[in-house]
């Protein structure tokens, strides 16, 4: 856990040029050297907005990597509608890194296959999923068939299946390499588990990450802009670099749903500043 004092000390240690890059408008920050950690957005952050505005806001934030929630390409869409959604994102220069969370909790291969067909049509390389222990072997079968990665998303103390990443890891550790984890840092800390240990334990099974911040690491309702809470963001980024993490760190901004852009700008500025400081 990083105290307010240590957080301020960390940021004050960033050289002026790096700090400026982190706090600059996205168009300026985009010109800086590529960070070792790739930042993206979970489109759940834009759940109150259309696909057109989701695309517009993603570009305004200087981000080109997006994991898509159903709000912006409905499961019930026709193939032609999914093709249109895929074209819309591609035309805007946005890469779809995955989709979900997709809940696959019916022990029905036909139901699971439906979601893989959806992902295939959109060209998604990965799905974040909310499965059960019994559906994971079914999901693994289709992951192999479709060559689509699966990242089990943990949902904290309320999740009766996989509260923490290590709960899912126990089951998938010997499965096909395409079966992995999406670690949600907020939900993980709320379980009382050690977040950094959970990340390190995941190893190569860590395929995706949802980043957020909490003022109280045990309370979901304390979510705040990244950098304003107690989440150990610098330690997380250093650990991911040490692990040679190849996935994306997606900001999942769950507060201020009607006006998320100001807080998302601040969150990305903080994360870019931290990354610049680590690299300096």
Image: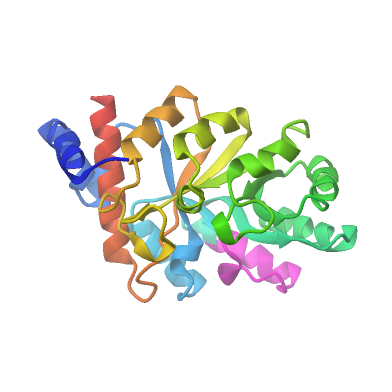
Residue 276 visible in the current orientation: yes
Measured along the vertical axis of the image, is residue 280 above or below residue 132?
above
Of 153 and 34, nearer the camera is 153
Total number of numbered discs in the rendering: 0
Asked if residue 78 lies in the magenta stretch, the reply is yes
* Residue at x 76% of width, y 41% of height: 147
On the image, which quarter does residue 14 sit in? top left
Is residue 31 at least partly visible in the picture? no
Residue pictured at 59% horizontal, 33% vertical: 202
On the picture, is 138 further left or further right than 100?
Answer: right
- Residue 247, given in percent of the width and then of the height, sits at 53, 37
Quadrant (top left/top right/bottom left/bottom right) for the N terminus: top left
On the image, the x and y values in percent for residue 97 come to 56, 48
Q: Which residues are magenta?
A: 69-88
Question: What's the image's color scheme?
Answer: rainbow
In-front residue for pair 184/140: 184
Task: Pinpoint residue 211: horizontal percent, then vertical percent.
Answer: 43, 49
Asked whether 141 or 7 is in front, the reply is: 7
In magenta stretch: residue 83: yes
Residue 207 rendering spot, x and y as whole percentages: 59, 39
Q: Is residue 111 left or right of residue 86?
A: right
Secondary structure mostly seen in the magenta stretch:
helix
* Identity of the residue drawn at 39% across and 72% down: 257
Above or below residue 175? Residue 142 is: below
Left or right of residue 213: residue 47: right
> For the C terminus, which image quadrant?
top left
């Amino acid at each position: 856990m990083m105290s307010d004092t240590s957080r301020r000390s960390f940021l004050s240690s960033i050289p002026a040029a790096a700090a400026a890059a982190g706090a600059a408008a996205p168009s300026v920050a985009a010109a800086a050297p590529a960070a070792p950690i790739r930042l993206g957005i979970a489109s759940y952050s834009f759940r109150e907005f259309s696909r057109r505005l989701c695309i517009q806001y993603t570009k305004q934030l200087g981000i080109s990597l997006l994991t898509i929630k159903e709000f912006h390409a409905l499961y019930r869409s026709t193939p032609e509608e999914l093709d249109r959604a895929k074209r819309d994102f591609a035309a805007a220069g946005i890469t779809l890194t995955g989709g979900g969370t997709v809940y696959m909790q019916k022990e029905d291969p036909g139901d699971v296959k439906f979601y893989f067909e959806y992902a295939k049509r959109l060209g998604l390389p990965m799905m974040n999923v909310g499965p059960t222990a019994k559906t994971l072997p079914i999901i693994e079968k289709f992951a192999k068939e479709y060559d689509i990665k699966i990242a089990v998303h943990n949902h904290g103390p309320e999740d009766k299946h996989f509260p923490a990443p290590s709960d899912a890891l126990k089951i998938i550790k010997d499965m096909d390499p395409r079966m992995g984890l999406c670690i949600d840092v907020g939900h993980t800390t709320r379980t009382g588990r050690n977040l950094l240990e959970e990340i390190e334990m995941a190893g190569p099974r860590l395929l995706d990450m949802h980043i957020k911040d909490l003022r109280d690491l045990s309370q979901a309702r304390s979510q705040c802009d990244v950098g304003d809470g107690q989440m150990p963001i610098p330690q997380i980024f250093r650990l991911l670099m040490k692990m040679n993490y190849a996935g994306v760190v997606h900001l999942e901004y769950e507060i201020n749903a009607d006006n998320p852009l100001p807080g998302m700008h601040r969150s990305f500025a903080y994360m870019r500043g931290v990354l610049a400081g680590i690299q300096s």
